[in-house]
């Protein structure tokens, strides 16, 4: 890697940690210069402004999570195991998070509003990718006669994502795995009883 690429990567890594633990609004450019040891001018050589840095940091986090998730999904042979591997990734996230501070999608979605439309749009795009991944698993499951034909794939995605994100939030807040484990167990039972053939 070139020196400029190394510098940009360093800035992104430090920004990711700060944004995901301290928050996007609460993190100042001074926080990032202190963490990286770089000047504001050096950071602005790689990022047009703080907003661009926020967007690239968020996208890098989500890309890393989705890449891991897609690999795990592809490695599984049937619909049950594909859906279960999504659940287990979230359950494992409490003990082995991809990034300090919790789920980047949950964190950014609770912070963005109509004054941060670009970042909000990026979060919405990430949510759409996640929903589409689950919906595709269910649709493919119907094709392979592994999922009940009357199952609504959109409903499965909504229930899974909202339950998992809520379970992560509750477990993180209480410093306990109990809630996410309860959510995952319930979702597995629901998938077996009401989704799969």
Image (cartoon, rainbow, N blue to C red):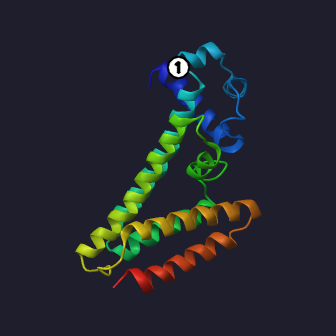
Q: Is residue 104 left or right of residue 37?
A: left
Residue sitting nearer the eye, 99 or 120: 120
Residue 125 coordinates in the image, percent (x, y): 44, 46
**Rendered image quadrant of residue 152:** bottom left
Return the residue found at the far left: 143
Residue sitting nearer the eye, 74 or 48: 48
Which residue carries the number 1 mark? 48
Q: Does residue 80 lie above or below 100 as drawn?
A: below
Return the residue found at the far top: 41
| Point 52% across, 44% down: residue | 61
Q: Does residue 158 lie above or below 66 as drawn?
A: below
Where's the N terminus, which quadrant? top left
**Rendered image quadrant of residue 148:** bottom left
Residue 115 visible in rendering: yes
Residue 6 coordinates in the image, percent (x, y): 51, 25
Residue sitting nearer the eye, 120 or 28: 120
| Point 35% across, 77% down: residue | 151
Q: Looking at the image, how many numbered discs can be counted on the residues? A: 1
């Amino acid at each position: 890697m070139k020196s400029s690429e190394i510098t940009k990567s360093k800035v992104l890594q430090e920004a990711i940690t700060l944004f995901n633990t301290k928050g996007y609004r609460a993190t100042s450019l001074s926080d990032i210069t202190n963490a990286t040891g770089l000047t504001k001018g050096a950071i602005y050589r790689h990022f047009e402004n703080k907003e661009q840095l926020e967007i690239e940091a968020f996208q890098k986090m989500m890309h890393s999570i989705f890449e891991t998730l897609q690999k795990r999904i592809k490695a599984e042979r049937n619909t049950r195991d594909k859906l279960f591997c999504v659940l287990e990734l979230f359950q494992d996230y409490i003990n082995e998070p991809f990034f300090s501070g919790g789920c980047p999608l949950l964190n950014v979605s609770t912070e963005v509003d109509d004054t941060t439309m670009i970042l909000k749009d990026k979060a919405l795009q990430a949510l759409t990718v996640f929903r589409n991944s689950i919906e595709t698993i269910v649709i493919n499951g119907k094709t392979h006669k592994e999922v009940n034909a009357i199952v609504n794939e959109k409903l499965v995605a909504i229930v899974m994502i909202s339950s998992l994100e809520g379970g992560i939030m509750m477990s993180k807040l209480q410093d306990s795995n109990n809630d996410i484990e309860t959510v995952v167990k319930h979702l597995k039972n629901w998938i077996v009883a009401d989704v799969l053939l």
